[in-house]
Image: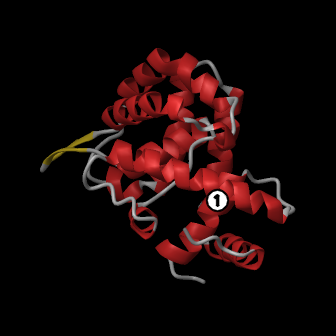
């Protein structure tokens, strides 16, 4: 696995901040989830702020079903809460079944009905999980997943689990750089990945 240098990470984050103006929606979503934590209805609204912005290419084909998302949050609140209190450094084999279950259930909750039938977004799932548990769950998109050999065309939950394990290793190395930032390590890694693999800015 390639470990980017401190200079590469910082360069990627700077390019992200320069080009990516939608990151304000990330901050708004994080704020709303913090403020409304424990209220599934309002938490669903907070997640929708980011999903309808960052994942607009998916949701232009169908509506986000807030009722489904709210029910997912209600039924999984205790599990989500437990992951929210943890860092990805604590990821263990004991978490694997639960992570895949969460991923698959949220994938159903975020599905849309379009003219071409039911569509599901592994990208939206990762973004929502990260917002709910920003120190534990990483973010990906198709290009990032492929770059890390986690192409999710088949068994996306298993591929996401692999991606979590990779991010655990990345965080263990990148935390040694002591980067001066108020962002989580997973957000820093995502900004680097987005700049490098998604956009090719670096």
Q: Residue furthest front?
A: 93
Q: Relative to 62, does residue 42 appear above or below in the rendering?
A: above
Query: Which quadrant of the view contains residue 142?
Result: bottom left
Residue 29 percent location from the top left of the image: 62, 42
| For residue 89, side relative to residue 47 (left or right) | right
**Observer-nearest residue: 131 or 155?**
155
Query: Which quadrant of the view contains residue 3?
Result: bottom right
**Observer-nearest residue: 45 or 100?**
100
Query: How many numbered marks have been drawn onto this rendered protein structure?
Result: 1
Residue at 64% over, 33% down: 33
Q: Residues within 10 Å of mark 1 (few under 14, many from 20)?
A: some
Q: Relative to 120, does residue 32 appear above or below in the rendering?
A: above
Q: Relative to 201, does residue 101 appear above or below in the rendering?
A: above
Residue 162 percent location from the top left of the image: 45, 50
**Residue 21 in view (yes/no):** no
Query: Which quadrant of the view contains residue 14?
Result: bottom right
Residue at 68% over, 55% down: 171
| For residue 12, side relative to residue 122 (left or right) | right
**Observer-nearest residue: 74 or 98?**
98
The N terminus: image quadrant: bottom right
**Residue 17 in view (yes/no):** yes
Residue at 49% over, 74% down: 197
Question: Which residue is denoted by mark 1 in the rendering?
Answer: 170
Q: Relative to 122, does residue 146 appear above or below in the rendering?
A: below
The C terminus: image quadrant: bottom right
């Amino acid at each position: 696995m390639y470990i980017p240098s401190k200079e590469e990470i910082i360069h990627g984050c700077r390019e992200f901040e320069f080009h990516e103006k939608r990151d304000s929606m990330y901050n708004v979503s994080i704020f709303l989830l913090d403020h409304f934590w424990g209220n599934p209805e309002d938490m669903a609204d907070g997640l929708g702020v980011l999903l309808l912005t960052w994942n607009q290419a998916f949701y232009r084909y169908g509506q986000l079903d807030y009722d489904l998302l709210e029910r997912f949050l209600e039924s999984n609140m205790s599990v989500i809460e437990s992951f929210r209190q943890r860092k990805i450094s604590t990821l263990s084999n004991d978490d694997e079944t639960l992570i895949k279950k969460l991923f698959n259930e949220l994938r159903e909750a975020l599905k849309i009905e379009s003219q071409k039938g039911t569509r599901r977004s592994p990208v939206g799932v990762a973004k929502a999980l990260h917002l709910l548990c920003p120190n534990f769950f990483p973010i990906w998109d198709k290009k990032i997943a492929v770059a890390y050999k986690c192409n999710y065309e088949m068994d996306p939950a298993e591929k996401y689990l692999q991606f979590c394990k990779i991010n655990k290793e990345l965080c263990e190395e990148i935390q040694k750089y002591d980067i001066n930032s108020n962002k989580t390590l997973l957000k820093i890694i995502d900004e680097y990945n987005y700049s490098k693999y998604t956009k090719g800015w670096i």
